[in-house]
Image (cartoon, grey):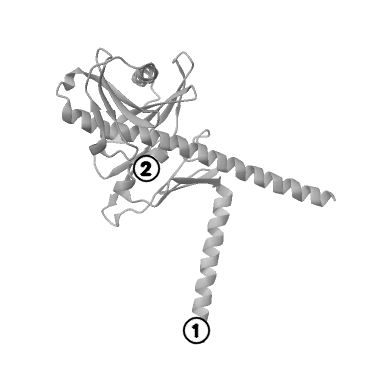
């Protein structure tokens, strides 16, 4: 009886752990997609605005957000007035974007995004945790979900043929829009070439995570992979730490598992492939 109870306890523990990892995978993936949607609006919105607005010296900045499922990129003046609104369909086709260059005030929602964006920018300028690198720039991405306010800071390349992971940060805010916490998501910056001089176009990649609070793949990793998918054609990508191994697939599915389980799975696959090879060689020898 004791053995049966022990087995049931182990099975319940394994099932509970699997559910927790599935939930964690889903939450991180959803956050990464939210970042991606905002960044896509910023990428295409910037192009559309610059092509149609002549007084660029009047621009104070921009940010993007999702307005009732519609991705929008907002440009504001140095006097903190909205001077450009670019709304996109969900497929982000620039030809179907709606551009409005009428000057107006921020909506209440836009005021919230603008405020945390500006407070994040002020913190970036004064906090030594933020590191700048040659041929890169910071992308400030505010997110507000269920009254939880945060700003992700990603590092983007200013040169071609490079995908950058790391040198990213998360800034969280209290209900007064004041900075509550600043943390790094990666310990360093990782630059991976899309095309390699020796092997040609790369097909995937892997990097490690060492920061204790960010052992899994990060929302910024997922956002970056989705942004550069059309340029890289990477079918999958892996991050690995002492606790977790995360596998991102280009179908926007992310799987997180314990690293020890991932190693066992890999060993089993290699062992099965080895057995198949041995069987084939034995069959050929018999012939």
Q: Give the percent coordinates (x, y) of residue 118.
A: 35, 18
* Residue at position x 58%, y 51% in the image: 261
Mark 2, other Cα within 10 Å: few <14 / some 14–19 / many ≥20 = many
- Residue picked out by circle 1: 285
The first of marks 2 and 1 along the sequence is: 2
Q: Nearer the viewer, residue 57 or 94?
A: 94
- In the image, is residue 271 above or below residue 141? below
- In the image, is residue 244 above or below residue 72? below
Q: Does dot 1 land on a helix, a strand or a loop?
A: helix
* Residue at position x 42%, y 37% in the image: 33
User: What is the tally of numbered marks visible in this picture?
Assistant: 2
Q: Residue furthest left?
A: 54
Left or right: 272 as drawn, with respect to 15: left
Real-space CA distance between mark 2 and mark 1, rounded to the nearest whole angstrom:
48 Å
Q: Nearer the viewer, residue 147 or 206?
A: 147
* Residue at position x 22%, y 19% in the image: 102
Q: Does dot 2 land on a helix, a strand or a loop?
A: helix
Q: Give the percent coordinates (x, y) of residue 114.
A: 35, 19
Q: Which mark is residue 226?
A: 2
Q: Is residue 262 visible to us here?
A: yes
Q: Which image quarter: residue 190?
A: top left
């Amino acid at each position: 009886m004791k053995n049966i109870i022990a087995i049931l306890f182990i099975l319940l523990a394994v099932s509970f752990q699997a559910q927790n990892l599935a939930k964690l995978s889903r939450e991180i993936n959803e956050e990464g997609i939210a970042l991606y949607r905002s960044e896509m609006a910023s990428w295409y919105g910037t192009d559309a605005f610059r092509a149609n607005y002549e007084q660029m010296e009047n621009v104070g900045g921009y940010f993007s957000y999702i307005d009732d499922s519609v991705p929008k990129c907002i440009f504001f003046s140095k006097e903190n007035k909205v001077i450009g609104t670019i709304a996109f369909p969900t497929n982000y086709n620039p030809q179907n974007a709606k551009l409005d260059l009428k000057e107006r005030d921020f909506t209440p929602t836009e005021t919230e995004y603008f405020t945390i964006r500006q407070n994040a920018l002020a913190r970036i300028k004064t906090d030594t945790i933020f590191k700048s690198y040659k041929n890169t720039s910071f992308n400030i991405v505010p997110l507000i979900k269920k009254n939880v306010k945060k700003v992700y800071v990603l590092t983007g390349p200013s040169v071609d043929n490079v995908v950058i992971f790391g040198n990213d940060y998360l800034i969280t805010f209290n209900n007064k829009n004041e900075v509550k916490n600043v943390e790094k998501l990666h310990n360093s910056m990782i630059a991976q070439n899309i095309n390699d001089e020796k092997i040609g176009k790369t097909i995937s990649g892997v990097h490690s995570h060492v920061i204790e609070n960010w052992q899994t793949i990060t929302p910024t990793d997922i956002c970056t992979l989705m942004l550069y998918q059309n340029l890289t054609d990477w079918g999958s990508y892996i991050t690995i730490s002492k606790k977790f191994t995360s596998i991102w697939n280009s179908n926007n599915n992310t799987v997180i598992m314990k690293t020890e389980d991932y190693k066992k799975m890999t060993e089993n696959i290699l062992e099965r492939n080895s057995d198949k090879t041995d069987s084939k060689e034995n069959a050929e020898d018999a012939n």
